[in-house]
Image (cartoon, helix red, strand yellow):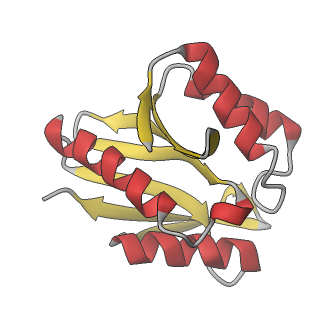
């Protein structure tokens, strides 16, 4: 079941708890803390299976025309089961119904780490297209790939 989360404390808790379970993607404690803090003021959806929150996605507006997947996490044992794609549909419909024109997401460029190759594949399957890669936006070991999707 997918739910829009209103409560700021619940948003922060969900974000923190799930990201802490994903060290392949979120290994820096200060990064997790920052995402959790930002989630308090984000639009956030979560997926619940068997009374357990297993996935979430948080939205950030980057312009009057564009929203970004600020952070997303799926607990490992629930990955590749379609839950992330279902959650993204809620995100997409919200963006479409609120007259945004584009969705963007930033991740580490394919070919750098196996875990991020999985992430890149997921976004491509959703319909995202490569926009640009910044080799030093984050740091030299994590080239930032920006994907974009037009909202139809």
Please state if 129 lies on the left or on the right of 38 as rendered. Answer: left
Q: Quadrant of residue 80?
A: bottom right
Q: Nearer the viewer, residue 106 or 43?
A: 43
25 or 136: nearer the viewer:
25
| Residue 129 visible in the snapshot | no
Residue at (46% x, 47% y) in the render: 69
Q: Residue at x 42, y 76 (%)?
A: 124
Give the residue drawn at x 18%, y 34%: 98
Q: Is residue 150 above or below residue 61?
A: below
Image quarter in which the C terminus is found: bottom left
At 23% from the left and 46% from the top, the residue drawn is 93
Residue 28 quadrant: top right
Q: Is residue 37 left or right of residue 31?
A: left
Which residue of the protein is positioned furthest toward the front in this rendering? 50
Considering only vertical position in the picture, is 138 above or below 34? Answer: below
Horizontally, residue 70 falls left or right of residue 143, namely left
């Amino acid at each position: 079941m997918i739910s829009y989360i209103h409560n700021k404390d619940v948003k922060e808790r969900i974000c923190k708890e799930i990201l802490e379970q994903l060290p392949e993607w979120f290994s820096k404690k200060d990064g997790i803390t920052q995402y959790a803090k930002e989630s308090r003021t984000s639009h956030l959806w979560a997926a619940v299976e068997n009374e357990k929150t297993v996935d979430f996605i948080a939205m950030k507006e980057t312009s009057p025309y564009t929203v970004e997947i600020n952070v997303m996490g799926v607990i490992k044992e629930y990955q590749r089961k379609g839950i992330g794609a279902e959650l993204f549909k809620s995100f997409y419909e919200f963006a479409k119904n609120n007259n945004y024109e584009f969705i963007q997401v930033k991740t580490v460029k394919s070919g750098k780490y196996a875990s991020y190759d999985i992430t890149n594949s997921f976004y491509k399957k959703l319909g995202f297209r490569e926009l640009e890669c910044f080799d030093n936006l984050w740091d030299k070991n994590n080239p930032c790939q920006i994907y974009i999707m037009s909202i139809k």
